[in-house]
Amino acid sequence: MLSVAPARLAGMSERPEFTRFPNVTFVEGETSDSVIYSPGGPADAHLSEVFAAHGLEGSGYDWQSAVHAALIDRGPLLERFSFDSEAGMFCAYGGDREALGEVATTLESLLERPVLLIDALAVAAERDLFD
């Protein structure tokens, strides 16, 4: 599992607008920026049964599907960034920091409120958003 710690990754800087997110890390790049979340730790341990109910493990891909589903009704927002998740890491990237802030806010909300994750996973299943 990939563990991301802001002080340990080269090229990473904590942006002031992203400091309010306890579980999401902002990575500033030369041509685009990224929002990173490492699933499988204490922040989402309480959600394992929610993912299991859908036959999922709670991987980076599963979180991508949930975030995508949570934002699906905000179509134009989805065009302002891209996903590049892996099994051990959720990643959204692009040049639009406002859009990435919405991604971070959404992911944090899904972590804090299991009912929102349940709803997002139901939408992901209905719309065939699982990778």
Image (spheres, rainbow, N blue to C red):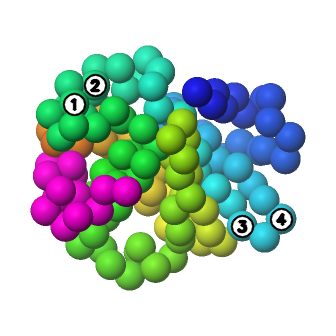
Residue 106 in view (yes/no): no
Q: Which mark is residue 52?
A: 1
In the shown orientation, is residue 53 left or right of residue 18?
left
Residue receiving disc 2: 48
Query: Dot 3, how many residues are within 10 Å of its Cα: few (below 14), some (14-19), or many (20+)?
Result: few
Of 29 and 57, nearer the camera is 57
Q: Nearer the viewer, mark 1 or mark 4?
A: 1
Amino acid type of the residue tagged 4 in the rendering: Glu
Q: Quadrant of the N terminus?
A: top right
Query: Regarding mark 1 in the picture, which secondary structure is present there?
Result: helix
Query: Regarding mark 2 in the picture, which secondary structure is present there?
Result: helix
Q: Nearer the viewer, mark 1 or mark 3?
A: 1
Instruction: Give the percent coordinates (x, y) of residue 25.
Output: 61, 41
Magenta span of residues? 119-131
Q: CA distance from mark 1 to mark 3?
A: 34 Å
Residue receiving disc 3: 32
Q: Is there a contact, CB below 8 Å, between mark 2 and mark 1? A: yes
Looking at the image, residue 66 lies above or below residue 73 = above
Q: CA distance from mark 3 to mark 2?
A: 32 Å
Q: Nearer the viewer, mark 2 or mark 4?
A: 2
Taking the magenta stretch, the answer to whether it contains residue 56 is: no
Q: CA distance from mark 2 to mark 4?
A: 35 Å
Residue 25 in view (yes/no): yes
Q: Quadrant of residue 113?
A: top left
Q: CA distance from mark 3 to mark 4?
A: 6 Å
Looking at the image, residue 58 lies above or below residue 15 = above
Of 11 and 58, nearer the camera is 58
In the shown orientation, is residue 64 left or right of residue 15?
left
Amino acid type of the residue tagged 1 in the rendering: Ala
